[in-house]
Image (cartoon, rainbow, N blue to C red):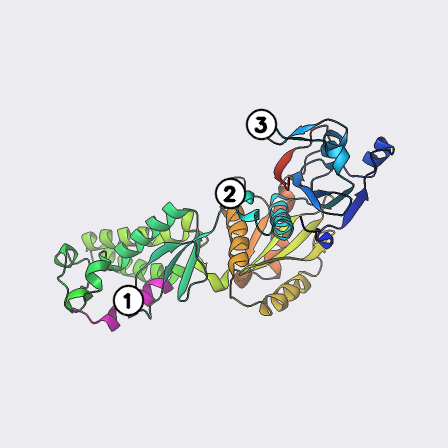
Amino acid sequence: MAEIVVPLFDRSAPFDPAGDFESFLKDVPAKWVVYLMADADNRPVQLLCVKNLRASLKRRLGGEETTLGPSKRVNYRDLVRHVHWRRVESAFEADWLYYEAARLIFPQTYAGMVGFRPAWFVHVNPENPFPRYVKTTDIGKSGLLLGPVEDKHAAANLIELIEDLFDLCRYYHILIEAPAGRACAYKEMGKCPAPCDGSVSMEQYRALIEWSARVLVDPAEEIRGHTRRMQLAAAELRFETAAKIKTLIDQLGRLGKGPNRHVGLLKDFRYLSLQHGPREGTAKVFLISPGRIEEIAGLISEPARPGEVLRVALETSERRGADVDATGAERVGIVAHQLFSAKHRGVFLRLERIDEKAIVKGYRDLRKQAPQEQVEGEGEGVLKELQSL
C-alpha cells in the first residue's frame, strides 16, 4: 500500500486507542465528509463518504469488529492511527471529492470500485470519407462530440431522431459503397438523398452532416424559420402543408428537451455551479470545464459584485483547454450524473449563456433549495466506501 496524498484533505486527527476516546470524538465534526482512515505509516485503510463523521468513527473505532467478508474480520481500533477528512455540503461536491480521493489513493483499482457512470455522447466527424453518427462514452475522439445525453438509450434515440429529421443514410454498409451502392427503400420514400448511388455527392452529404450537427447544438434558429413557414402556409390556407411543418417543428423541439436538454459541443461543456456552503446563506462556486472541476470562490451572502465572480470564472475557463483525457472523461461523467439526476440539486449555469443577473438569480434559486446535509444525529449515513484490505 502506498502512502496517501494528504493535501487532498484539509483536516486530520491522530488516533490513539489507549487515549480518551470521548475526547477524540469531540475533536471531529458530526458533519458530512469524505474521510480516510490510515495506519501508523499513513497508509490507506478505508476511504468513506458519510453524513456524520463522528458517528462513523464511534462505530468503527469504538472497539467493535467489522466484517470485510465471509471469513475475514478486522478491528479498525488496532489498525487505524490517523483520520483525514474534508467537509462537503452537497452531493455534487461529495461525488467529486470522493472520486478525486479514490483516484489518488487507489490508482490501480478505483475505476472498478467507485462505480461512477460514464457520460454518453453522440459522435460524428463530417470530414470522414463516410461520416455517420454513433453513440459513445469515448470522448477523446476527433470530430464533433455532442452531449451529454441521459444514457445510451437516449443516445440511440437521438441518432434515430437526427436521421429522420435530416434524411440521413440509415445503412452504413451501403453508404461505404458510394457512389456504386444500390439505394434502399428510403430513397424511394424521399427520405434519403442517396449518396450511396451517387444521387448526391459525398461532399454534399458531408455538408448535410455538418449542418445537422449545427442544428443539434442550437435548434432555435431552425425552429424559428420553420415557424415562419408554417404561419405563411396557414395564412395562405395551405393547411396540410402547415400541419406537416408543425410536425417537423415538434420533432426539432425534442432536440433541446428531456434527455437531450444538455446537448452541446464537448468543447463548450463549461458550467458555473452554485452549491450550498457550510452555513445558511453561504454558497460554494465551482467552475466546470471539459475534463476539470474546481472550486473557485465562496459566497457568504448574495453576491454584491456578481461581475467579479463572472470575471474569475471566464478568465479561469479561458486558461483551460478542451482536450479531455481518461481522467477528464470520468469527471465529465460526474457532472453529467448530477445534471440528469432525479434528485438534481444545486444550480448549474452554462458559462457561455450567463451574465451578472443570472449569477444573482442562481444564488437565489439555490437558497430556495433545502441544504442537503443532514442534521447531527446518531447514524453515520454511509454513502460510499472503499477498503484497501
Which numbered tag is attached to residue 208?
A: 1
Q: How much space separates mark 3 and mark 1, taking CA atoms?
A: 60 Å
Magenta residues: mostly which secondary structure?
helix
Nearest the viewer among 127 and 161 is 127
Numbered circles on residues, count? 3
Reading the image, the residue beneath label 3 is 70
Q: Which residues are magenta?
A: 199-214
Q: Earlier in the sequence, mark 2 or mark 3?
A: 3
Nearest the viewer among 9 and 312 is 9
Picture coordinates of residue 62, whole percent (x, y):
77, 29
Label 3–label 1 contact, CB within 8 A: no
What is the quadrant of residue 280 in the picture?
Answer: top right
Nearest the viewer among 84 and 133 is 84
Label 1–label 2 contact, CB within 8 A: no
Q: Quadrant of the C terminus?
A: top right
Reading the image, the residue beneath label 2 is 341
Picture coordinates of residue 381, whole percent (x, y):
65, 33
**What's the residue type where badge 1 is placed?**
Leu
What is the quadrant of residue 292 in the picture?
Answer: bottom right
